[in-house]
Amino acid sequence: MSATTQPSTDDAPSKEARLTEYLREKAADGEMYFKSKFIADEVGLSPKEIGALMVKLTDAAEDLEIEKWSYTSATTWRVEPA
């Protein structure tokens, strides 16, 4: 019964995978700058979830260079292909 109460993760990409793919697509032509709150709807995550994942992706995404660029009312991230 527990299998029917939990959402299936087989078909849906993980939050980390969705964010990583979004960043790869947007940064394909060069660097991009963004604040989590402005991409939250496009990625389907909350700004807080994006912020937590960005810290994790800084080390985990080997094909992306991710830098915490500035902080003015919210963190601005810089992303470019590695």
Image (spheres, rainbow, N blue to C red):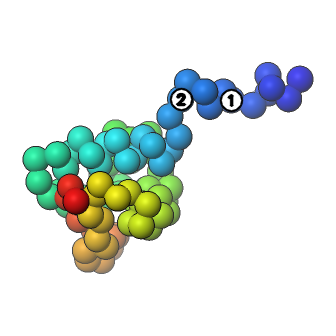
Q: Which residue is mark 2?
A: 12
Residue placed farthest to the bottom in the image? 71
- For label 2, count other residues whose C-alpha is less than 10 Å away and answer few (under 14), some (14-19) or many (20+): few
Task: Please report the residue visible at 26 percent of the width from the left and 64 percent of the height from the top.
Answer: 65
- For label 1, count other residues whose C-alpha is less than 10 Å away and answer few (under 14), some (14-19) or many (20+): few
Task: Please report the residue visible at 44 percent of the width from the left and 56 percent of the height from the top.
Answer: 50
Q: Which residue is mark 1?
A: 7
Residue 56 in sight from this viewpoint: yes
Please identify the quarter of the rendering in which residue 61 is found. Answer: bottom left
Q: Secondary structure at mark 2?
A: loop
Q: Return the x and y of residue 78 as percentages of the image width and height.
A: 23, 65
Residue 51 in sight from this viewpoint: no
Residue 69 vs residue 40, the one in the foreground = 69
Q: CA distance from mark 2 to mark 1?
A: 9 Å
Residue 31 vs residue 49, the one in the foreground = 31
Residue placed farthest to the right in the image? 1
Between discs 2 and 1, the one toward the N terminus: 1
Q: Secondary structure at mark 1?
A: loop
Residue 17 vs residue 82, the one in the foreground = 82
Give the mark count.
Answer: 2
The C terminus lies in which quarter of the figure? bottom left
Q: Return the x and y of residue 76 as percentages of the image width and height.
A: 27, 68
Query: What amino acid is at disc 1?
Result: Pro
Task: Please report the residue visible at 14 percent of the width from the left and 58 percent of the height from the top.
Answer: 31
Residue 50 vs residue 60, the one in the foreground = 60
Q: Return the x and y of residue 11 as percentages of the image width and height.
A: 55, 24
In-image side of 76 versus 7 (left or right): left
Query: What amino acid is at disc 2?
Result: Ala
In-image side of 74 versus 60 (left or right): left
Task: Please report the residue visible at 39 percent of the width from the left and 46 percent of the height from the top.
Answer: 19
Check if mark 2's residue and mark 1's residue have beta carbons within 8 Å.
yes
